[in-house]
Image: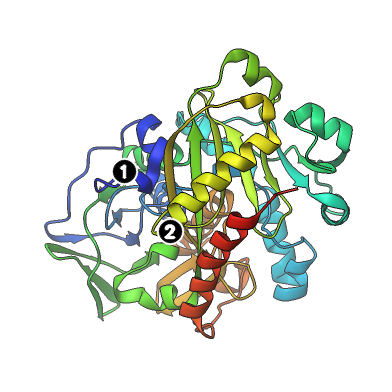
Amino acid sequence: MQNDPRSHGLYEKTAPPPPVTSPLKGEARAEAVVVGAGYTGLSAALHLAEKGVKVTVLEAVEAGFGASGRNSGLVNAGMWVMPENLPGVLGKEHGDRMLALLGNGPALVWEMIDRHGIACEDVRKGTLHCAVGEQGLRDIRERQRQWKAWGAPVEVLDGGETARRIGTSAYTGSLLDLRAGTLQPLAYARGLAHAAVKAGATLHTQSPVISTEEAKGQWTVRTAAGAVTAPWVIVATDAYTHGPWGEIRREQIHLPYFNLSTAPLSDNIRKSILPGGEGCWDTKEVLSSFRFDAGGRLIFGSVGALRGTGTAIHRAWARRALHRIFPQIGDVPFETEWYGMIGMTDNHLPKFHRFARNVVGFCGYNGRGIAPGTVLGRVLARHVLGEIDEAGLPLAVTPLERPSFPAVREAYYEVGAQVAHLVDSRF
C-alpha cells in the first residue's frame, strides 16, 4: 500500500480486493461514527449496521492498513500474559469477563467468517506454542494449568509429538490450543469491510480525521474535505493513531514485528513441515512465529523493523534460523517481506478509554489483535446500542497515561532486536 512493498508484503499480493470506497466529501449525518477500519472498527461497524444503526466509518488510508493487515496471522485465544494475570491485574470481575471473552475470541472470528462468507485462508487446526529449553517447557505447562482451570482444550505435547507435528526437533515440547488457528490478516479485514458495507455501513477511506467538536449532544468529526455528525464516536485506531486522539500513541510503546515469506515449497518438503496446518510461535523473549499460507509459502517472523541496518540483519537471521529449524527446506528464497508496529501497554493488556462523553474505544492489543479486536468491536457496538452499560464492560475506564522514556524504550526494542538477531545462534 502507498507504494511500499514492506507495508503488507505477501498479504497485499494474495488478499481479495477491498470494497470500492471514496474519501468523505461534504456534510453527512449518522448515528455513530467509527474512526479506523481495522478489526475493532469494522467489527463494531458491522454489528451496529446489522442492528439497523446508521454508521459511518472513517479510515485514514485503506481498510486493514494498520496492524490488522500486517500481523502474523495467528488467531489465538487470550493475551500474551498468563490467564491468571488478568484477574490479578484487572480485579476478579473484569478479569473473569476478559478471560471468558478472549478465551472464546477465536470462535467469534470463525463465526464471522462463516456467516459472511469471508475468503481469508482460515485454517482451524489450532496453534502450537513451542517451548525453547526446559524453561520454555515449564512456561507452557503453567499456561496449560491455568487455561485448564477454565475448561480450555489445551494440551502439552512432548518433544517427540511436537517434532512430528512441526517437522523439527528444535523444541522441547509445545502447547496445542485447539480453539486457535490461522488466517490471512488483510483478507480478513477486507472481508469484514465488505460485510459491513453490505449490512448498510458507509465506509470512507483516504479520510483521516483532523478535528472533532461537540454541540448540543452531537459530535462533528471532520476530515479535510467533509464532516460527519453523530451522537456517538468509536475510536478504533490503536497503534496507528494520528490526529485528535494522539494521546493513544503517546500511551503506548511501539514494538516492531516483521514477517518474510518463502517461495512456495515443494509438495515433498511441505508434507514434512506442519502437516497438520497449525500456526506456531516460541517462548523466547525475542520470539519467532511461523505458519503456512494457502499457497504453500512458509511465513516466518520475529521482533524487529525492516528499515535501516535492521533490514539486512533480520533477513540474514531469518535465513539462518529457518535453516536451523527446518534443514530440509534447502535454499528456498524469501519472496516478500513486511513489518508493522504493535502497540504495547504498561500491563500488556488492552485499555478501555472514555475520551469524552459518548466517545469511547479499546486500544493496546499487545500483539493479539485478531480475536480481541473482533470481540471488543462487538462489545463497543453493544455499548452504543445500550445493551451493555459502562459497568458491564469487560474493562473499567482507565485514564490515559504516558509511559516513562517512551522514545528510549522504543529505540531499545528496535536496536535490541537487531543485536539479538545479529548474535543469535538460536538454540
Left or right: residue 17 versus residue 175 is left
List x then y, in percent, for residue 333: 48, 30
Quadrant placement of the N terminus: top left
Identify the disc placed on residue 309: 2
Q: Is residue 40 left or right of residue 216?
A: right
- Rendered image coloring scheme: rainbow
Q: Is residue 171 above or below residue 342?
A: above
Image check: 192 left or right of 3?
Answer: right
Query: What is the spatial separation of the Cα atoms under label 1 and label 2, in whole angstroms?
Result: 46 Å
Residue placed at 62% from the left, 26% from the top? Answer: 329
The residue that mark 1 highlights is: 200
Disc with the residue nearer the chain's start (1 vs 2): 1
Amino acid bearing label 2: Thr
The residue depicted at 44 percent of the width and 47 percent of the height is: 70
Q: Nearer the viewer, residue 385 or 272?
A: 272
- Helix, strand, or loop for circle 2? helix
Element class at badge 1: loop
Q: Position of residue 93 (x, y in %)?
A: 73, 70
Q: Is residue 253 left or right of residue 146?
A: left
Identity, as a three-letter code, of the amino acid under mark 1: Gly
| Residue extending farthest top | 268
Nearer-the-camera pick, 195 or 10: 10
Q: What percent of the width, then of the height, locates residue 379?
A: 53, 58
Q: For mark 2, does the 10 Å Cα neighbourhood hold few (<14), some (14 to 19), or many (20 or more) residues?
A: few
Asked whether residue 237 appears in the rendered view, the answer is: no
